[in-house]
Image: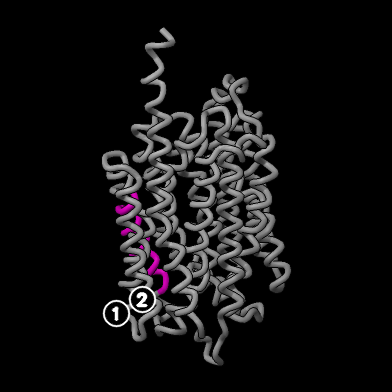
Amino acid sequence: MLLVAAVQFVNILDFVMVMPMGPDFAAALGIPSSRLGLIGGSYTAAAAVAGLVSSLFLDRFDRRAALGIAMLGLVLGTALGGLATGLGTLMMARMVAGAFGGPATSLSLSIVADVVPPERRGRAMGIVMGSFSIAQVLGVPAGLELARRFGWTAPFFVVAGIGLLIAVVAVFLLPPLRAHLAERHQEVPASQLFTQSNVLLSWVMTFMVMAAGFVLIPNISAYVQYNLGYPRSRLGLLYFIGGTVSLVGLQLAGLFTDRFGSFRVGTAGTLLLTLTIFGGFVLSPPVLPAAGIFVSFMLAMSFRNVAYNTLTSKVPRSGERARFMSIQSAVQHGASAAGAFFAAQLLTELPGGALVGVERIAFISIGLTLTLPAFLFAVESAVRRRAAQPLVTAPELQ
């Protein structure tokens, strides 16, 4: 779990550091701040396509070897980001990173689901997803400081170097991960995955969750700086505090999900997230300072994401897990791209950099977020019915 978490740390850091640095490279490369969503969207769009393509073959290989290849491609894409000369070349570099980063995520989650029993999977997901918080606590502030001291390109090259090191270590230290290959005879063809109602419901839930987040997430850094007047010099501290809260929240969410189920924990996270978005992005002036908005947002996302990811890991069978996860990763990244691109069309920029139209995208995020409890209830109920079925039919088989 710690090796997988280390891989995910680099994967997530590569993604999350770009958005806080947006105003920095926007100024250096002449990119309007209202168009920053396009850069995040280019990553997620490429990851969506890669997820669909890789779903056709990932379950045929040792998870360790496949993860190593995905990480090397991610490292290459990250390094290319530091060589960008404008919006177009930066988007191309992010597309390369997304094409390998998306499959790396689905492989990591498949490994967790392969080796951890369902009754302990919430805690395991909390550990692995804790890499997101560590990236926020350590990686993002360090990246912002590197960009401030040495220029916006420095974080790209440093993360690429760290990623290469961790990829090599993980490939050498992870054991072979071939247990799923023994169940290839049970694998459901890709076409039949699309006939399973719970699988389809899970993917629709995924789309709603990710789109709800990414109409806002790529614009948060610009919003707190230009709309709320938060100083750039303290932006690293903001992400440090938010990441620390998120790290604690993820571990608690994992324990609570194992005990109370995804529906209850995810619903609590949904309510907190809705209140945060309304109070921080719709009301003017916000009811909380920038730090309060950010911390509350990160905590709510922690509870929502652990509950949602733990539940979706229980939907597929072992032999079809990487295929399911790859398609789900494609849906995640496609929804993220759609949310980011859509928000970029609704936002405009004032001469001082302040964003106009934030309340509109906030209402869209709230509307999508509030659909989650219904999806969690439906998917969790279906998973429980399937888990109980062998207990009913076992006497007949004996």
**Amino acid bearing label 1:** Val
Farthest bottom residue? Answer: 351
Vertical placement of 218 versus 179: above or below? below
- Residues 262 and 151: in front is 262
- Residues 39 and 336: in front is 336
**Residue 42 magenta:** no
Across and down, in percent, residue 224 comes to 42, 78
**Part of the protein shown in magenta:** 235-250
Return the disc, 1 or 2, that comes first in the chain's sequence.
2
The residue lying at 41 percent from left, 45 percent from top is: 378
Q: Which mark is residue 287?
A: 1
The residue lying at 46 percent from left, 34 percent from top is: 113
Across and down, in percent, residue 63 comes to 58, 32
**Other residues around mark 2 within 10 Å, as few (<14) / some (14–19) / many (≥20):** many
SS for dot 2: helix
Mark 2 — residue?
280
